Amino acid sequence: MEFKNTIVTACDSNYVWGAYILVASLCYFNVKSYKHVLGIKLSEKECKLLEQFENTKVFNQQERNGESVCLMKPHAIYSADTELITWMDSDCMATGDVTDLIRVEPDTIQIRFRSMEENAMVYRNYYGKKDSIGTIPKKVLNIWQKDVNDLNKSQISTVCETNCFVMRKSNLDFIKMWQEQMEKVIVDNKLNVYNKDSIGYFMTDESVFNSLFAFSSKAPKIDKYLFDVQKDKMIAHFGLNPKPWIHWTKRSFEYYNLLQNILTWCKDHGYETPPIPNSLKAKYKSYECLRANISHSYRSFKYNISTSLHSLHTKVRD
């Protein structure tokens, strides 16, 4: 069977479990798509674990070139040759058959933009006295505008997430622009997902993506994001640390039973798994649930204290 879409992801050995969960979930729900994985220095065994699934191919790179997996996203996308191309981070999982959600209008990208409340959390440490909370801080926009050097006024007021998006093959020029812009501005921290010392690009690849949406006249238009509308047919993103193959967070724990069902399905259908960590063993479910709740309470406490101190510091400074 030929498909019109390719789902693309990337991983190194630290995220093999994530890529495995993503690919397995897509097969479990019979999502009709090719699946490509850009491997970064994976072992032969790790490649075989992923390629055992139908319509799945690993493009393994033996050299990392001093870059994080995030900065390799364009290279992974280039491997696809279908009309539609869907990027999914290797810490994502399908919760249903999302085949009919993989669509996008010509000259657009289907991607999720954060609400103003989410945006306020993302940029809480970057707002100045004259900024409107929930928008993109002026100091960030100034850096983007200077580096993109195209439009004078931002076309966006909040930022998108790059963990999942759908595009057309005809938009590969924009992906090339993304790659070239990352090579231009991400120069002092290429190995980490975040760079707290960079005002404009602390979210590395995602920040650069947004800078182009903001100030490039060549950026595609935005299509409505469909992968978060229905709980039983969406793309779940395990965005917070730790990841489920290390430990569970309170937010991700709602997918615990589904993931157990997927792993059981893999076993019943003869698919080999990577060595199963304790966090994914059913006998540790109660422990993982308790740990997730305690960790959540601790993080919430730290966040509230940090927010209060930052707010006080801002008032004193201004």
Image (spheres, rainbow, N blue to C red):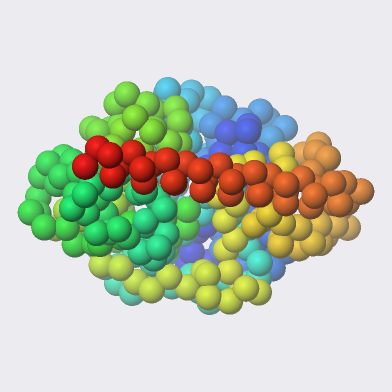
The quarter holding residue 241 reads top right
Query: Which quadrant of the rendered structure holds the N terminus?
Result: bottom right
Q: Nearer the viewer, residue 140 or 105?
A: 140
In the image, residue 178 above or below residue 2: above
Number of numbered labels in the structure image: 0
**Residue at horizontal 57%, vertical 63%?**
235
Using residue 143 as the reference point, say whether residue 120 is left or right of it.
right
Q: Position of residue 156 (x, y in %)?
A: 24, 62
In the image, residue 177 above or below residue 260: above
Q: Nearer the viewer, residue 51 or 194?
A: 194
Q: Position of residue 194 (x, y in %)?
A: 43, 36
Using residue 138 as the reference point, say whether residue 109 is left or right of it.
right
**Residue at horizontal 71%, vertical 39%?**
246
**Residue at horizontal 92%, vertical 48%?**
283
In the image, residue 143 above or below residue 172: above
**Residue at horizontal 72%, vertical 32%?**
45
The quarter holding residue 221 reads bottom left
